[in-house]
Image (spheres, rainbow, N blue to C red):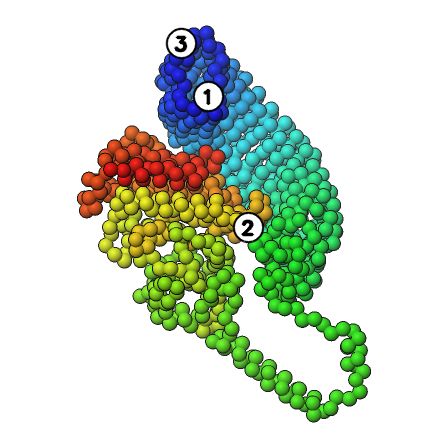
Amino acid sequence: MLSGFIPDELGKLQNLEFLSIYINNISGEVPHSLYNLSALSTMELSNNHLDGTLPFDMCNALPNLKYLLLSQNQLQGQIPPSISNCSALIDVELDNNYFSGVIPFGFGALQNLQRVLFRSNQLEAKRPRDWSFMDGLTNCTMLESLDLGENQLQGEFPSSITNLSISLLELYLDNNPISGSIPAELGKLNNLNTLSLSGMFLSGSIPVEIGNLFKLGMLYLDGNMISGQIPATLANLTQMTQLYLENNALEGSIPPELSSMKLLETLNVSNNKLVGEIPKEIMGLPSLSISLDLSHNYLTGILSPEIGNLKNLQSIYLSNNELSGEIPGTIGECQVLQSLYLDSNLLRGTIPSSLSKLTGLQILDVSNNSFSGRVPEFLATMNLQYLNISFNNFEGELPKEGIFKNASGLDVRGNPKLCGGVRQMHLSHCISQPSTHRNHFRRNMVLIPSVVGSFICITTIICLVVIYYTRKNPRNKPQSDKGLKYGLEPISYNNLLRATENFSPNNLIGKGSFGEVYKAVMSFENVTTVAVKVLNLEKHNASRSFFSECEALKNVRHRNLIKVLSLCSSIDHQGNDFKALVFEFMPNGSLATWLHPNACTDRPFRSLSFIQRLNIAFDVATALDYLHYHLPAPIVHCDLKPSNVLLDDGMTAHVSDFGLARFLVQPDTMPSQSMSSTGRIKGSIGYIPPGIYKKAYYLRKYGMGSQPSVEGDVYSYGVLLLEIFTGVSPTDERIIDGLSLQKQVEMAFPDQVMDIVDPKLFSETDGEHNLYAPENVYSCLVSVIQCGLLCSKESPKERISIKDVTKELNSARTKVLRP
């Protein structure tokens, strides 16, 4: 827990050989005096908060340095070319910093070099000559580990990589915009145990020569544009434990030969174009213990009984295929299974009783199939945290215990013959059938007076006619009780129609991803003007957005969150489904219209003052803090951006649009597929964390990614905070090609911070520039911009919490307002 700076006096210890201060809270620059310790063999300063640059001549006086370990800091600038003067260097680790520019050529002089870790920096290679450092590394015959992942290296896959030392054990180039095909010559690096080429722009096919890497234990080719078939030669990789080929364009069938990978723990070939049956050999591979993901392909056939051999497997993903038949009873032999996804297939039959043996099963998704029969009672006795049986043909009474009394973890929609269950499921009441004895009695009744029979017949016909016309006329249809479910008084379609003047274009105040927003005159509580959000149900996931927003907002109460007043779930006058939400009206519109002139359409553009921006930033941070830490189950917004921050008449900010919001009930309780199976990106370009958009700076191709998290919201908030004070959106054309808003700000921080803030920040019209002491304003801006940069770090682990942000902003605001 050491903090402060590294004392310059350490440089006086001329006999010092070993210096290790890693994993502390040390900040500031590395003292220049340390670079004169000629006896020093190890400098281990990783996992601190060191900043500044490395001196150009840092290695001129360090002839004995073997280990230069500076990972996980905030160092920037170029890697000094003088590093080649550290002739004894064995291990250089500069990963997770902010180093930029090209990688120096001189590594070829380091004959003892074994490890080069430069991951997660801003190193670049824009021209072929920028890759010349690779030619130098080919001279390092003892090189074992090379990690250049998550940088800005681009262009064609450099052929010189195939000339690296055959001693190489690990090669990471992932998440760089490198294009071209995988060179067959990689098969010469026959000592590799890890090859990571994921998240790039690679095309072509997987070369059969990869099968020559007999020692390969982990292969990551996911997130590219690789096509062709999975080569059967991969079966030669008998040491393989992790194989990731997902999110490509692979075709053909899954080679059964892959079953020769007797150590394989994870196999992921999801989101490809694979066809044919799932090989029995794969389904019966007993080494699979972490995950088998074959989802989002075109696989056909039945589920093989061999699935019972997967006794040690934790997760099975077979969603979105064309599998048919029944679930084999052998599924009960998968003793440690925790997650089973069979949704969106052609499966039928009943849920087998053997499933009750899976005592550790937490997630079961069989939605969008043709399962039938009663919902098994044994599901109520299991430890399920999430159960989705929606859109099947289940019938009868729904159990009421276990998972069936957890409405947030249960989905039974699309089963019209289901009844009963807990009240929160809002199913119809079950009608009990007459007993056998009573049926026998009735069958043996001797006489029923004909007059009574005729009367009953006529009455029945009249009732049926009345019911028919009542149901046919939507104006007579009872109002949905969905409002009551969410603790709101529902409102009728006709009332909304009148209040918006037949949804007149004159009352249209905004459009969103899933619908339109109208201004309406209605009386709710203490307000007379409201905003009505009408869902366009023809858009994919619009209904899901409606339910997500209702679920998220029904129990939240905070001054900086938009307040939902009522809802309507009915049908319109044409008999179409109709859904709308009624919110409090925000007379000053969205934050976007105050930041960007082109977004302001309903009034003359007027810029926000410095203190207004500071207050809005604090309001939004406070709202996120409430959502993340002050509710029974944290809520993640998932789409924080200026257009979703609304301003009331006092310019107080209110976070709105919870259509993509997610509850974090427990880790791993909600299905991972639910976030990606829709094929729609959860969030908005520029504000999405790198875990979901790994290539947000270059992409014209976007990939799916990780689960929603509070860290993801913090990232979006960081981008928003920078946008508030720079006036530049993350997708603005003014951003230099190849950079992000964060990195462009970072380049000017902190010395040129006044050069990057919005020129309208201290406009002459508001006179604020005369109200506050300049030194206080500058100090405040530095604190705010630093918060934005720390929130929008690429690695979630490096981002500060929203709690710390609120404290820092409050402190900065107090400082600037101080007389």
Amino acid bearing label 2 = Ser
Q: Nearer the viewer, residue 302 or 663?
A: 663
Q: Position of residue 407 (x, y in %)?
A: 58, 56
**Residue found at the far front of this picture:** 819
Q: Nearer the viewer, residue 139 or 442?
A: 442
Assign the C terminus to one quadrant of the image. top left
Q: Position of residue 506 (x, y in %)?
A: 31, 66
Please rate how many residues cluster around mark 1, counting C-alpha atoms within 10 Å: few if below 14, some from 14 to 19, many from 20: many
Amino acid bearing label 3 = Lys
Vertical arrangement, residue 660 with respect to residue 690, above or below? below
Q: Secondary structure at mark 1?
A: loop
Q: What number is the disc on residue 45?
A: 1
Amino acid bearing label 1 = Leu
Residue 216 visible in the current orientation:
yes
Q: Which residue is mark 2?
A: 674
Q: Which residue is mark 3?
A: 12
Please rate how many residues cluster around mark 2, counting C-alpha atoms within 10 Å: few if below 14, some from 14 to 19, many from 20: few
